[in-house]
Image: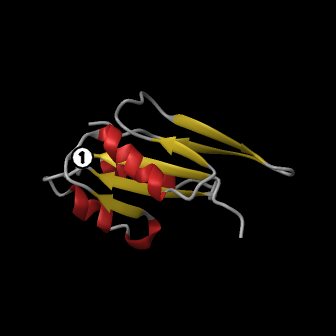
Amino acid sequence: MAKTRFSVLIPVYNRAACVRECIDSILAQTFLDYEIIAIDDGSTDGTQEVLRSYGDRIKVLKQDNQGPEIARNLGAVHAGGEYLAFLDEKLEGPVSLLSVGPDREETLNLRPLVG
């Protein structure tokens, strides 16, 4: 079986109000060669419930609050993709990742957390 192209890592802390829009924007893509890994960095606002509502469509990891750098590292350890795409609050505006294969060129457009 071929390796997943992208692992999209979303470190999140207390973003219940906006994490759904971020994840939904990824799931709405026509490009499907990715996995989503959301790392809950000890949220206390219902973020975990929002993440769990996606069932097996995303991987959800949880850790005590240690900061986004540690959350990113945890996600990377569990990632199965050929490439890692970090999607967090430090990004401004949408991000596009280009995948080029022998017969195709596809783009994965990512929308960072805002709010």
Q: Residue furthest top?
A: 92
Side of 66 where 70 appears, left or right: right
Q: Residue furthest left?
A: 44
Side of 5 where 52 appears, left or right: left
Q: Residue at x 25, y 40 (%)?
A: 67
Q: Residue at x 23, y 55 (%)?
A: 47
Side of 47 where 32 appears, left or right: right
Q: Pointer 1: residues within 10 angstroms few (<14), some, or many (20+)?
A: many
Q: Position of residue 108 (x, y in %)?
A: 60, 45
Quarter holding the N terminus? bottom right
The answer to whether 83 is drawn above or below residue 54 in the figure is above
The answer to whether 96 is drawn above or below residue 2 in the figure is above
Q: Position of residue 88 (x, y in %)?
A: 38, 38
Q: Residue at x 34, y 53 (%)?
A: 39
Give whichever of 20, 80 is nearer the camera. 80
Quarter holding the C terminus? top left
Q: Secondary structure at mark 1?
A: loop
Q: Which amino acid type is marked by label 1?
A: Arg
Residue assigned mark 1? 15
Q: Residue furthest right?
A: 102
Q: Position of residue 15 (x, y in %)?
A: 24, 46
Does the image show residue 25?
A: no
